[in-house]
Image (cartoon, grey):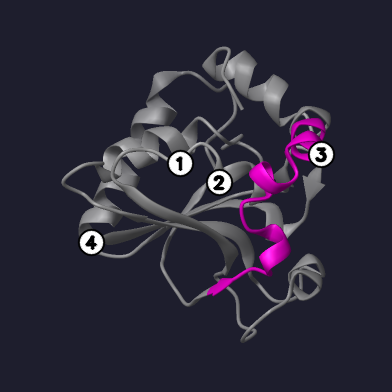
């Protein structure tokens, strides 16, 4: 099993696209990239810890490739927004790919370049590609939020502007 770590704004919206795919063992919401040990949601939301909301995916690379994870990731975010994602603003909601080894780094850089060259977006792709650091699991309330609070999750996803943006840039989808 391998790990993949992606920051895509609100981690509630980053779990369901990866969850329950063949070869994906688990998706955990959490915080990474910052300097504070064991941060809480409240700590991270201050935008003073350096942490980003992220998901960490445990997957079997024999059944689900890292390239496929990257394809799913890009189709969940606005990679041109340096100030957050949709109505969630601030550093903790910015996008980043956290690589766990040189192969992931190379594949992430290649996929970012392909996206930039595709012409899909008029603005530059600003998603960072950074080395993985300690990943802190978020509070239980945040885990599998899309399942535990399905109605609120669907309202949030639509109301944040994420759903409309993704549909406009990637085509109609199930959330």
Residue beneath label 2, please?
A: 15
Q: Of the two numbered discs 2 and 4 on the same chain, state the one appearing first in sequence.
A: 2
The image position of residue 90, as x and y in percent, is: 77, 56
- Check whether the beta carbons of the residues at disc 2 and disc 3 lie within 8 A of each other: no
The image position of residue 138, as x and y in percent, is: 64, 68
**Residue drawn at 63 percent across, 62 percent down:** 52
Mark 1, other Cα within 10 Å: few <14 / some 14–19 / many ≥20: some
The image position of residue 63, as x and y in percent, is: 20, 42
> Mark 2 or 4, which is nearer the eye?
2
Pick the quarter of the image with the C terminus: top right
> Mark 2 or 3, which is nearer the eye?
3
Quadrant assignment, res 164: top right
Pick the quarter of the image with the N terminus: bottom left
Front position in the image: 98 or 60: 60
* Number of marks in the rendered image: 4
Quadrant assignment, res 103: bottom left
Q: Of the two numbered discs 3 and 1 on the same chain, state the one appearing first in sequence.
A: 1
**Residue drawn at 63 percent across, 83 percent down:** 38
Residue beneath label 4, please?
A: 102
Q: Which residues are magenta?
A: 136-156
- Check whether the beta carbons of the residues at disc 2 and disc 1 lie within 8 A of each other: yes
**Residue drawn at 70 percent across, 48 percent down:** 148
The residue lying furthest to the left in this view is 62
Residue beneath label 3, please?
A: 152
Query: Alpha-carbon distance for marks 2 and 4?
Result: 25 Å
Q: Is residue 150 magenta?
A: yes
- For residue 18, which numbered disc appears in the image? 1
- Check whether the beta carbons of the residues at disc 2 and disc 4 lie within 8 A of each other: no
Give the overall secondary structure of the magenta segment: helix
Query: Alpha-carbon distance for marks 4 and 1?
Result: 22 Å
């Amino acid at each position: 099993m391998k790990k993949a770590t992606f920051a895509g704004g609100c981690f509630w919206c980053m779990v369901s696209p990866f969850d329950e795919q063949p070869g994906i063992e688990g998706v955990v919401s959490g915080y990474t990239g910052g300097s504070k040990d064991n941060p809480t949601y409240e700590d991270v939301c201050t935008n003073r810890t350096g942490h980003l909301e992220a998901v960490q995916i445990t997957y079997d690379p024999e059944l689900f490739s890292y390239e496929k994870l990257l394809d799913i990731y890009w189709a969940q975010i606005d990679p041109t927004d340096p100030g957050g994602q949709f109505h969630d603003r601030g550093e903790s909601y910015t996008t980043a790919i956290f690589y766990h080894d040189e192969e992931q780094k190379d594949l992430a850089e290649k996929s970012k370049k392909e996206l930039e060259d595709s012409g899909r977006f008029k603005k530059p792709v600003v998603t960072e590609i950074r080395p993985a650091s300690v990943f802190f699991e978020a509070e239980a309330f945040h885990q599998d939020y899309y399942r535990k609070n399905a109605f609120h999750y669907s309202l949030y996803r639509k109301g944040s502007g994420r759903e409309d943006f993704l549909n406009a840039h990637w085509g109609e989808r199930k959330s």
